[in-house]
Image (spheres, rainbow, N blue to C red):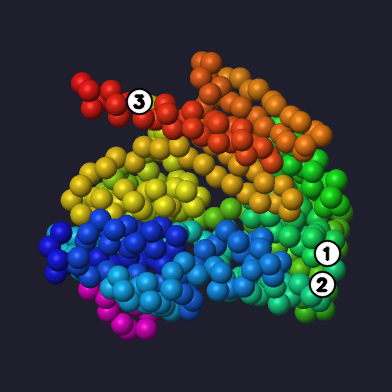
């Protein structure tokens, strides 16, 4: 791109930050604006449910880069501006209009707008004390309420719910996790790993309820008093933390005619359906990056945000580098560290490895006798070994293409 052109990144997320950083690293010399709707400097989210909630780190430790970095690299960071309308021309350029009335012209638009928490639609869901944990303001509200509470009910046994449960339990609160499905983290891990997670958290003192559906949230005065289940049981709660999934923020993309389906649909270079706009991070629905895999995926992980943003930066600078890699994830839950390498969907065999004396546990997933993924609990060596094996296999198609 010519040096006079201007890239506007809407969303100061992990992916948005990485894209801005990668553009400069690739030598892009045009203008870059990184725009976020929160009144905070760009920050990391994973620690919100863990170290930050427990006051083990300060908010300054969450900040991605210093003001000096942005100044030195000529990246304009804009806080507290929400884009509500985009006027886009056929060549991909246009103007983004903020709720404040400010206008942000661009030659290339990047949507790194992430996702928002799925809201409960039950009686009592709007009571004070019903909280979500997605951004820094959510974490600040939760931290402010915790000192005055004893009982916490967490609706949703996904990563956010379990991580927050472990943190709150370590802070001395009585915690109950209520999961509608048959097991914890059902979309991300297999039944063996889920059972191990539940056993660990129950052993520490967290109550885990599965196959449990919430019928309503009960008021106590002008706030929360408990959670009632379909079977009539009432779980005491001074606050209720909800973690029942997210919804990708596709509204802006849809308004400018981009094809959306469980996120903004992009190609292997992170380019949307108009051939110009780029979408990265939690909002992007992309071709499966696993070598040889079919179908499409929308990942909600730091690793994907970083790697996809790097590929997008290449695309913006005119170089097509296809996104092929090994998805990996992690989740710190108290003294337990879960690491996942690869995608286990479609496996036909599992192999469980455990060392109870050392607290290590892992599940390896195979298809046609080839390892495709692993869940590793407090077993970093297993994780590294499988990740390396998957990465080696991912490189083979590249090598075959280069020698053909």
Secondary structure under badge 3? helix
Spatial CA distance of label 1 from label 3 is 50 Å
Q: Are marks 2 and 1 in contact (CB under 8 Å)?
A: yes
Region rendered in magenta: 95-106
Q: Which residue is mark 3?
A: 396
For marks 3 and 2, the one nearer the N-term is 2
- Front: mark 1 or 3: 3
Residue 100 lies in magenta, yes or no? Answer: yes
Q: With respect to residue 381, does 156 lie above or below?
A: below
Please rate how many residues cluster around mark 2, counting C-alpha atoms within 10 Å: few if below 14, some from 14 to 19, many from 20. few
Q: Secondary structure at mark 2?
A: loop
**Residue at point 57% right, 63% down?**
134
Q: Judge whether 70 appears above or below 216 on screen.
A: below
Closer to the camera: disc 3 or disc 2?
3
Return the residue at label 2. Answer: 149
At 14% from the left edge and 69% from the top edge, which residue is drawn? 4
Can residue 96 be seen in the rendering of this structure? no
Q: Is residue 325 magenta?
A: no
- Residue at 85%, 46% in the rendered image: 203
**Image side of residue 258 versus residue 48, left or right:** left
What mark, if any, has residue 173 been given in the picture? 1
Quarter of the view holding residue 147: bottom right
Q: Is residue 289 above or below residue 206?
A: above
Q: Nearer the viewer, residue 151 or 385?
A: 385
Q: Residue pushed farthest top?
A: 368
């Amino acid at each position: 791109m010519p040096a006079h052109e201007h890239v506007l990144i809407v969303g100061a997320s992990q992916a948005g930050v990485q894209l801005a950083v990668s553009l400069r690293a690739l030598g892009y010399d045009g203008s870059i604006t990184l725009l976020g709707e929160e009144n905070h400097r760009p920050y990391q989210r994973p620690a919100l449910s863990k170290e930050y909630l427990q006051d083990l780190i300060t908010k300054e430790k969450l900040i991605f880069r210093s003001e000096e970095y942005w100044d030195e690299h000529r990246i304009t960071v804009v806080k507290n501006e929400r884009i509500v309308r985009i006027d886009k021309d056929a060549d991909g350029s246009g103007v983004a209009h903020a709720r404040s009335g400010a206008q942000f012209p661009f030659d290339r638009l990047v949507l790194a707008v992430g996702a928002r928490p799925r809201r409960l639609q039950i009686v009592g869901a709007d009571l004070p004390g019903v909280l979500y944990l997605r951004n820094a303001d959510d974490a600040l509200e939760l931290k402010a309420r915790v000192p005055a509470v004893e009982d916490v009910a967490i609706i949703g046994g996904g990563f956010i719910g379990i991580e927050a449960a472990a943190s709150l339990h370590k802070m001395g609160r009585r915690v109950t996790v209520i999961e509608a499905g048959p097991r914890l983290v059902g979309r991300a891990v297999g039944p063996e790993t889920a059972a191990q997670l539940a056993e660990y958290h129950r052993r520490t003192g967290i109550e885990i309820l599965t196959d449990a559906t919430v019928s309503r949230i009960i008021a106590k005065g002008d706030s929360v008093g408990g959670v009632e289940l379909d079977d009539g049981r009432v779980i005491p709660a001074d606050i209720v933390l909800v973690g029942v999934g997210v919804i990708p923020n596709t509204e802006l993309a849809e308004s400018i005619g981009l094809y959306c389906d469980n996120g903004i649909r992009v190609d292997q270079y992170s380019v949307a359906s108009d051939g110009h706009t780029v979408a990265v991070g939690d909002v992007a629905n992309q071709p499966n990056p696993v070598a040889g895999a079919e179908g499409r995926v929308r990942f909600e992980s730091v690793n994907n945000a970083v790697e996809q943003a790097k590929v997008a930066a290449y695309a913006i600078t005119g170089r097509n580098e296809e996104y092929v890699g090994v998805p990996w994830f992690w989740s710190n839950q108290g003294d337990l560290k879960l690491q996942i390498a690869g995608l286990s969907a479609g496996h036909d065999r599992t192999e469980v490895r455990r060392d109870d004396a050392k607290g290590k546990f892992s599940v390896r997933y195979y298809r046609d006798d080839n390892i495709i993924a692993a869940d590793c609990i407090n077993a970093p060596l297993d994780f590294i070994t499988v990740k390396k094996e998957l990465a080696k296999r991912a490189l083979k198609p590249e090598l075959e293409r280069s020698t053909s």
